[in-house]
Image (tube, grey):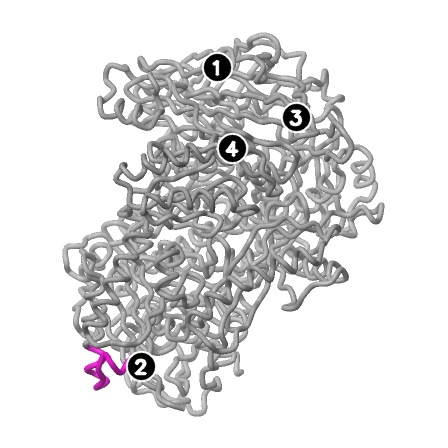
Amino acid sequence: MMDQTQEIRMQVMWNRLISVVEEQAMTLLRTAFSTSVREAGDLSAGVFDPQGRMLAQAVTGTPGHVNTMAEAVLHFINEIGRENMFAGDTYVTNDPWKGTGHLHDITMVSPSFKGDVLVGFFACTAHVVDVGGRGFGADGKSVYEEGIQIPIMKFAERGVVNSFLVQMLRANVREANQVVGDFYSLAACNDVGHERLIAMMTEIGLDTLDALGAFIFSRTRAATLERIAALPRGAWVNSMMTDGYDQPVKLMATVETRDDTVNVDFGGTDGVSRWGINVPIIYTKAYACYAMKCVVAPDIPNNWASLEPFTVSSPENILNAPRPAPVSLRHVFGHMVPDLVLGALAQALPGKILAEGAGALWNLHMSVKPTRAGGKQAEILMFNSGGMGARPELDGLNATAFPSGVMTMPVEATEQAGPIVVWRKELRPDSGGDGQYRGGLGQMIEIAPADGHEFDFSAMLDRTVTAPRGRNGGQGGQSGTAQLDDGTQLKPKGWQHVPEGRRLMLALPGGGGYGDPAKRLAEARADDVLKGYVTK
Amino acid sequence: MTQSIRLGADIGGTFTDIALEVGDRIHSTKVLTNYTAPEQAILDGMEVVLAEAGLGYADLEILIHGTTLATNALIERRGAKVAFVTTEGFRDVIEMRTESRFDQYDLNLKLPTPLVPREDRFPVAGRIGAQGQELAALDEATLVALAQTIAKGGYGAIAVGFMHSYMNGAHEVRAREILATTGLPISISSEVSPQMREFERFNTVCANAYVRPQMADYLGRFQVRLKEKGATCPVFMIHSGGGLISVETASEFPVRLVESGPAGGAIFAADVAQRFGLEKVVSYDMGGTTAKICLIEDFAPKTARTFEVARTTRFAKGSGMPISIPVIEMIEIGAGGGSIAWVDAMGRIQTGPESAGSEPGPACYQRGGNRPAITDADLILSKLDPDNFAGGAIKLSTEKAAAAVGAHVGDRLKLSAQSAAFGICEVVDENMANAARVHAVENGKNISDNMMIAFGGAAPLHAARLCEKLGIDRCLVPPGAGVGSAIGFLKAPFGYESLASRIIGMSSFDPASVNALVAGLKDTAKGFVAQGSAGAVYCETVAFMRYRGQGWEIPVPLPDRPFTAEDANLIRDGFRSAYARYFGRAIDGLDGVGGSGLEIEIVTISVKAADQRPAPAPVTLTTGRSTAAAPMSRPVFDPATGQDQITGIIERSALAFGARVPGPVVVVERETSTVVTSPFDVVMQDDGSLLLIRKEVSK
């Protein structure tokens, strides 16, 4: 009977631990200044054991941070050293190769002490508004041009904030108040996690998390391995063309199932780019794992044991770019990785995998300036999504982010933030690939500077040359376009200008179709026409 | 003081509850909800309570009604065919939603379909800017033509939603004038929900139009039937914010009736809180399919400005539709007596959100259900008496319960039926505790500072354990808990909340324009209150504020008087202290440069107007004036010790006022049982409430 009760207590504590990290994430969501965090949920939060193994991760958050944060904690433990860790400490970095892939993401780790005993760590990551340098864009030639680099160091020691770091930060970033505010928010969210954890341990009478960790890991590992064992054995290759900065870039992946693991190798992918579109392997791995987990173990929570069986390998290339390659827009290719990996898995699991979609978000960073006295200056970030690929038994989702987990911001809120007018943001007819199941539609966006203003924008667009492909006979989705209303064609990456009186016109890609178009039901076709999803 | 005769009627998903108040007596009954003629169930129930009280329809002085019909119409998609007229370029706002997936890992995810399909959404040129200025004139010619299309299109209602209409509703008002030729009811977003964020506002105005014809019909029919029966009393509706509005207002803004039943429950708890003078309370309502938790401070439930209804998938956040109206804020999770327990891939016990409902019901009901529900687990742990459930109306089978728990949970985890049942209860209690804890944190509160008020059929079975988990020392189980919402209706004030989004930076605080805005909101809110109440009206103004650049606003109470320029500092300070309460510390002061700190801004201003309710007769909380022992005992599983404990069994009606009985003890009554676990004692209060109190707490 005692053993049986113990089993149940462990289950309950596991639930409680997940609730603790959820609270941690909610705190960050509500205090963050960065638009991408507060409106779009671009963050993650988790709790780790003293060895740096992730015990639980908040469901709130986006896949890009799934296990980048998990690896980051190990770097913190190594570099800070246990002997230098004290209650009330918070450590920080934005190292793209040790954190989450670019300088804009700040990762903070805090040790959690119960009395004198180190019982674990809390970590969180969020995207801040600015890190100085050239700003959020592809134009840096090396990471040194992309902003301030913060090596792993203490943000706070025994509760006292590192004022030198804050001063350096203030001198190096554009929106100092908001950036410093976000540093405080990140630290505060770890504090909330720590307080809740200690309250839980005190209430339950736990001195360490060892037994609970062992329980979580053994259960998760068994469930994950069972799923992996059910996969066919073999190796499957897929390649994909993407726009790149000024020339197309080929991505390639080989998914191989081994005894207890699944490995993805990115050999065959094009080399490191001169532009800020390179991806540190830590971020590539996050999205590769995400894609595999969606297919293999979607219901198994993220922790050390559920992520460990998924491994990646790669020679140096654009998906494994070494320091000091520029990496500011690493998310664009990072977002392409799931479609790349899923294309390989589709061969292993025919009939189970969706078609390709728009992949990367169509983010716009706009820097608005007045053209005459009385105007207003503003930095505005917008997230927009194209269509998702059709699924084996369902149409693709229209204008929905995949693989990213972020949300779009309300146009009304965006227009409150700065002097622009969004004249159109609606579905783009005829953009979804035909098939038994139709690809999701992209969207059309028209943005003009308000009277008396102009803006520059950093383009982070893809799939303007290379369209998302269909699957199993489904047709490809429409590729995207970017131009001004006078017909001027724009590039998919880099800073560009929109003068007063002109409109930026974007057409976002649609998803690929699934299955033979001849098999699409007549009622579905009639409904597409009635709704105006298809006009011809 | 004359004896007032008031009747509350709550139409819920399964039952229609009636509560008749005659002076300080309450007569109540439950009848099955009638979906084809909801008013019939009310009349049936009224017959019962009126007969019991020896009164006739003509004796009624007021009838207060709440209904889940609007909610159900949204969930079941049984509303009118709506034409949605919107700004050109924004036809798909209610379809594109937030462009995100509410479940990151489900590749076969289905998003909820929009209330108004694309072919019924009609874009019209014309544009208001973010500051309320006109950027492009309204295309009236198109509207005139559109009026004809809509008139011939078989529509039942029209919704109008234009960009930035919360700043300037002129285009919407003009559109309504032109579309009036259709003869259809027209809802405009600047009246239904003047809040920033187009998806929420457009969806809300569409929802209003969607349920409007049906609700107007129903309310009309109900009033006719009442008159036929000889009732002459006025009828008022309870709205989602917990106040009363006239039937006319309800017919025009029926979306305000969504979630009015649960609001009644929160008011019921608030009334109990006021009776006992409890300033910090968490109400806990657990029924057959869900549990609802609400924070009540200073006798008023917390309210919010937006909520989500009709969640399609496992109660997942984001799987429903947003409705932006003032609402009593509560969290609802899929944890009720009928919630099904199962085991996931990791061997973890999970509960809900799937529910056995009333048919087939939990396995122990012996109506063909063979999957284990929470009630089955409660029965196995002897929390329920199998021969005395629902006054003996339903005979419960412990065997059937044990078989279901064993087959679906115990065998998979190699646990005995009792251990598996304990596991199920622990998991459901933990889920509720987590939800309550997170909800408190989201509101900048500490849950253990509160007293719990538990009601609803299943709550008394789980309340003590929930208090153990939450570190709460005291819990009240009031009488009449089974029809709590209907009783709550009788306590509701005439009240209305109006709000408007307006970005106001505190460094450029302009008292004149804020005063004008607040005065307008006050007039609106007071106007609605005046429809039902001639008494003194009390107003409460709240600003929803943030540091510029943040996306989450926190409520800051403002004084009820005209503002002067100096008030900018007062409001700023109010914000800072509220911020510190929510998030630990305010942010300014981190600015070492001085003077160039973060701008603080108001995003939305709300004015709540309500008449003063007579305070309920106070009851003094007693921790016991005498000690009593339970006459019988049986072994009941005790979660704190993880073992069976000899547990007293006593009838609620056998407890004398002021009697304290040491736990563990189970207090049984007709509808349910109150389980008092080993850390608690139970004390019968002078109003018939049960107080669960930790043994070590004497006050």
The residue pinned by badge 1 equals: A253
* Residue B334 percent coordinates (x, y): 36, 54
Neighbour tally class for label 4: few under 14, some 14-19, many 20 plus, Cα within 10 Å = many
Q: Closer to the observer: label 2 or label 3?
A: 2
Q: Is residue A268 visible?
A: yes
Q: Secondary structure at mark 4?
A: helix
Chain of residue at mark 3: A
- Crowding around mark 1 (Cα neighbors within 10 Å: few <14, some 14 to 19, many 20+) is many
State the CA–CA distance, disc 2 to disc 3.
69 Å
The residue pinned by badge 2 equals B26
The residue shown at (61%, 13%) is A245
Looking at the rendered structure, the kind of residue marked 3 is Trp
Question: Considering the numbered disc 1 on the image, is that residue within a helix, a strand or a loop?
Answer: strand
Q: Amino acid at mark 1?
A: Ala
> How far apart, in angstroms, are the residues tagged by discs 2 and 4?
55 Å
- Indicate the chain on which mark 1 is placed: A
**Both labels 1 and 4 in a single chain:** yes
| Mark seen at residue A97 | 3
Our reading of the magenta stretch's main secondary structure is helix
Whether callout 4 and callout 3 share a subunit is answered yes
Comparing B367 with A146, the one in front is A146
B58 in the magenta segment: yes
At label 4, which amino acid type do we have? Pro
Mark 3 and mark 1 lie on one chain; the one further toward the N terminus is 3
According to the picture, the residue beneath numbered tag 4 turns out to be A63
Earlier residue among tags 1 and 4? 4
Rendered location of residue B673, percent (x, y): 30, 73
